[in-house]
Image (tube, helix red, strand yellow):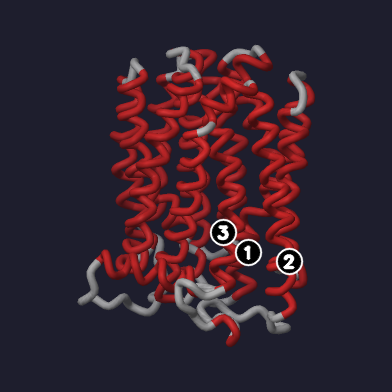
Amino acid sequence: MWANTNVRNVVFARFISRAGGEAAFFVGIWGKAAFTLDANPTELAFVMGALGVASLIGASIAGVLVDRFDPRKVVLVGEILFVPAALALIFANTIPSLVLATFMLGLVGTPVFTAISSFAPFLTDEEDELSRINGLIEGASWTAFVVGPAVGALLAGTVGVDAIFVFDAATSAVAAALLIPVKVRKLIPIDETSTGWNELKEGFRFTYGHRRLRFYIFLGSTVWLLFGTFSALEPLFFRDVLGVEVETLGWVNSIFGIGLVSGTVIAARFPARLRTATFLTFLVGMNAVGVLLYVGTDLLQVVVAAGVVWGLIIGMMAPLHRTMVQINAPSKMVGRVMGVNHIHSEVGHLLPLTLAPWLAAALGVQMSLIISGTLVGVGALAFLPAARRLDRTRQAEVPPPGLPDPADEPKTMGST
């Protein structure tokens, strides 16, 4: 698999681009907002809200673009547009200007994320290879999670926060160059007479009407709600509860990435018997344990150790979730199904932003984060009976990509 030049270039491009993105987000945007501009919970929620709204718009069109043009073209154009968007953050020296610059970054960056998540089926039609390619792409993402924040911490501590945005722009340019020679296989062409709006509606209609896709996407949404709360409050946890400097955001998230990479390596070796709804639901529920360990104290050394554990859980969960969605997505709709999945992730990020400042004011930053983690655990328990039902009705062999189980023929929006 690694000898395949197309796969190798996609994986390297993902690593390089994501390294810049993680540095820009966890140290650049978070650091500039919380430490340079001294943002309060409401202001930080506005910054993250701008990113969320832009990402929601980008995710809405990205799936249609992938199905119409292929993921390579979408990622290539997105990476090129990302360069000026990243550099614009250098000039954002007030909260309103940071909100605007972050919005533009999310708008051009989200189609890249959706397209790269859709890449695997365009590189292979074999299920085992699909799982391995997803594992490699996810592994590249999580390795970037180690490298990116560490580079961000070094740049913030030596040159300044704005240098991170130059680094981010440079990594996108390199990623674009790597993708130029990549070749993707042709899938079922989209109806050229159809409008983008109709294609988008068809993606939602099919996804919500397919009981397995519906289950996996709504299950994943519980985790996105958790991540949304953390995007609004985690930098304030570091600043106000742990009492550390901006570089610590980068170092701790880099160590967190070690857990992510380890989890991805484990996930790539999951036997077929673990590719089940029940096991995925179990991993989602384990996020509650990770959160309680991560934010349950005000001791930095505990946070560091817990970050590895929580990262391990997410690293196993994320590629498995993506693979289970792709297995059930028809070839001609992979992009749109992944787009619906990404839209759910962005809505999940946005919803907590309406409550996070109020919760932080009423209960404190730390308790708000603890509550959000606990709710994910409760949500996973609620999904468990449905997961077991899906596994009981599943064929002995997982259907190949694009061929759902006979029992999974699309239903109407209101079906159960």
Report the residue marked by disc 2: 385
The tag earlier along the polypeptide, 2 or 1, is 1
Nearer to us in this view, 317 or 189: 317
Question: What is the quadrant of the N terminus in the image?
Answer: bottom right
Name the outermost residue toward the left.
Answer: 193
* Amino acid residing under circle 2: Pro
Q: CA distance from mark 3 to mark 1?
A: 24 Å
* Amino acid residing under circle 3: Phe
* Marks 2, 1: nearer the viewer: 2
Secondary structure of the residue carrying numbered label 3: helix
Q: Residues within 10 Å of mark 1 (few under 14, many from 20)?
A: many
- The residue located at (47%, 77%) in the rendering is 330
- The residue located at (47%, 34%) in the rendering is 354
Residue 262: image tag: none
Q: Residues within 10 Å of mark 2 (few under 14, many from 20)?
A: few
| Residues at discs 3 and 2 in contact (Cβ within 8 Å) | no
* Marks 3, 1: nearer the viewer: 3
Nearer to us in this view, 348 or 23: 348
* Amino acid residing under circle 1: Arg
Question: What is the quadrant of the C terminus in the image?
Answer: bottom right
Residue 280 at x, y = what percent? Answer: 70, 60
Residue 223 at x, y = what percent? Answer: 61, 48
Secondary structure of the residue carrying numbered label 1: helix
The tag earlier along the polypeptide, 3 or 1, is 1
Asked if residue 1 shows in the view, the reply is: no
In the figure, residue 368 lies in which quadrant?
Answer: top right
Nearer to us in this view, 294 or 326: 294
Residue 218: image tag: 3
Secondary structure of the residue carrying numbered label 2: helix
Report the residue marked by disc 1: 132
